[in-house]
Amino acid sequence: MRRLPRTHHLELLVGAAFVALALVLIRESVLLGAGWGSAGPQPGLFPLLSALVMGSSGLLVCAQAANHGSESSPFAERSELLEVVKVAAPMVAAVVLLPYLGFYMVTALYLGLFAVWYGRMPWYLVLPLGIAVAVVAFYAFEQGFKVLLPKSIFYGYFLPFF
Amino acid sequence: MDPISGLGLGFSQVFQPYNLAFLFLGVVLGLVIGVLPGLGGTSGVAILLPLTLFIHPNAAIMMLAGLYWGALYGGVITSILFNIPGEPWSAVLVFDGHPLAKAGRAGLALTTAFVSSLFAAFVSNLLFTFFAVPLAEFALGFGPPEIFAIMLMAFATFVGIGEGASPLKTLIMIALGFLLGAVGLDLVTGQPRLTFGTITLLTGFNFVPITIGLFGIAELLVSAEEQAREKLEEIKARLGWHDLVAAVREVGRRLWLLIAATLMGFWVGVMPGTGATPAAFMGYGLARQYSRSPERFGKGAVEGVMAPQAAADAAGIGSLLPMVTLGVPGSPTAAVIMAGLFMWGLIPGPKLFQERPDFVWGLVGSLYVGHLVGFGLCILATPLLAAIMRVPYALLTPFIVMISILGAYAVNNSLFDVWIVLIFGLVGYVLRKLKYPAAPLIVALVLGDPTESAFRQTLIMGHGWPAILFTRPISGPLMGVAILLFFLPLIRVVLTRRRAQVQQA
């Protein structure tokens, strides 16, 4: 069985990521000019100061994590992480599919399939519910609020409005 | 405009059917969001923010403020009945509210919380009404150094008395908020900055998708973990007339405690930065400290419900005061509401009172009416609201995700913003687990541009030196407080070390 990541590993990783980001931004700010120009302070000054604060705090966070590493707890229980992945994966899928299937089809499918798969609800109850929500949303937003949301690639071919 | 005629104008705004309908909607949505444990008031306001683009600003501000009050009331119900805080600010109510409910006095605990809330709201509304104009007029004389000093104080508050978060992590989040806000065209020279040559980033990061991701989606993922743990236990409660009478009697007996908690909460709210959550904890501390029988606390003391709830509600109202008068939000939720003002093309600050009295006073009027609506709904519909807790997570999650996507997309009609929601949701989950506070980032993102322009103008005024910040009569003391707050965590560390040394010796 593989060991789960402990909190201080993640602390180190996230702290280091902030330091790295800060370094990139410090370089950008300096290139932009972080001194005194003809119109007062140059555009890079404020980002430079912010990035310096972020970088130095990130270093200290890393140092703290390295010092207290041995006493840290697991980041999360295996069962908890599994739940998070089970909830997050469909979210990612919904966003990836959005440009292809359009907002309304994604809504109906996501709502229906997630309730069946994750919530173990009977499909004959939740699939119609998903479709109903999508249809109501379509009339509310497209006609009521006049917001145009992404449509599916089938739009205009054989589906009347999705 | 003097407060009395201002209030008249405000009420005439509130009682327009269109505005009243949205105020009502806001309170109802707030109650629902307050009851749902996976979704807090700040995320609720953020998720619904884009939808307010399609209604009149006067109605929009009432709806968002109403949502705040609704969430303040709604969190009470889950804390007391289910032992699960629906909102961070109602977490304290678990200590004494739930034991009371277990002892068969759920009705009393709930009504006491609602009555305390209403009382605190009424006192705070009066304070708001009469302090708003003087504060705004005072702020009219502020120059860039004063504005910068106030902003700095807001961020120092997060670092100094943040909600248990590490000061270093708070600093990182503030800096990240500033940096995200700085992406795009420079506000003085118009040069593109931190865009890395891309066109997508030229317009900068919008705060709406980032807020929705960091609060809404990240919260959903954190509550996904909880699905792996326990099942709900619920105590049923139906509120009756006798509960109300008993609650008013309890409140009447401890009126001074309530007034003290309210005033303290209001002050915590007005102070830029943190809001209702620390106020609630401080209210609890106040009640225990001045109780004649502190040993009852934690076992079902009525004061342990009364004082935190009064302080939280007062802080919520107080946090809007510096937002409208100075343009500095007093709490994270107020920061998101302030982001809404920018979105509707309004600039919060002292001039708003002259330019849009209908907007400002409409908000003030809605403070009174919104709280009455929330109170009435809670008294009548608590069993119904408690039932919302039982809506399956599996149905709720896709629903919230799709509303979040919709909101993020609707601001600029861009799929890039939808990706931002997702990325900040996933990153936000990890950050939240590591106790990086999300609120300072959002406040820094919203206040980034005003802070930076105040900073640059100050430097120009001081010919390149920030010394001017310390020499002006108003900004000087503010800077002093800000610096003290920044170093407070360090001072605390030194003090505890010294105490430990003394004990060893």
Image (cartoon, coloured by chain):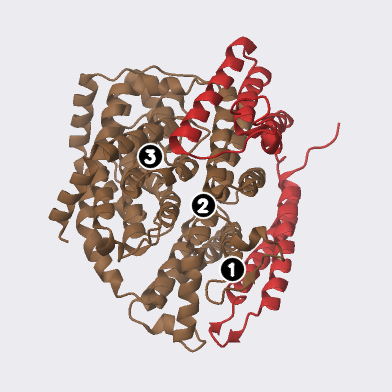
Q: Which mark is residue B185?
A: 1
Label 1 resides on the chain identified as B
Amino acid carrying label 1: it is Leu
Q: Secondary structure at mark 2?
A: helix
> Residue B287 sits in which quadrant?
top left
Query: Chain A is which colour?
Result: red
Q: Is residue B153 visible?
A: yes
Query: Chain B is which colour?
Result: brown
Among numbered discs 1 and 3, the one appearing first in the sequence: 3
Between the C-alphas of marks 1 and 2, the distance is 25 Å
Q: Looking at the picture, how far across and down is residue B377, in whole percent?
A: 30, 27
Q: Is residue B260 visible?
A: no
Q: Which residue is mark 3?
A: B67
> Residue B405 sits in which quadrant?
top right
Q: Secondary structure at mark 1?
A: strand
Q: Residues within 10 Å of mark 2 (few under 14, many from 20)?
A: many
Answer above or below: position of B171 versus A75: below
Question: Between residues A39 and B4, which one lies in front from this camera angle?
Answer: A39
Between the C-alphas of marks 3 and 2, the distance is 18 Å
Q: Looking at the picture, how far across and down is residue B219, in whole percent?
A: 57, 39
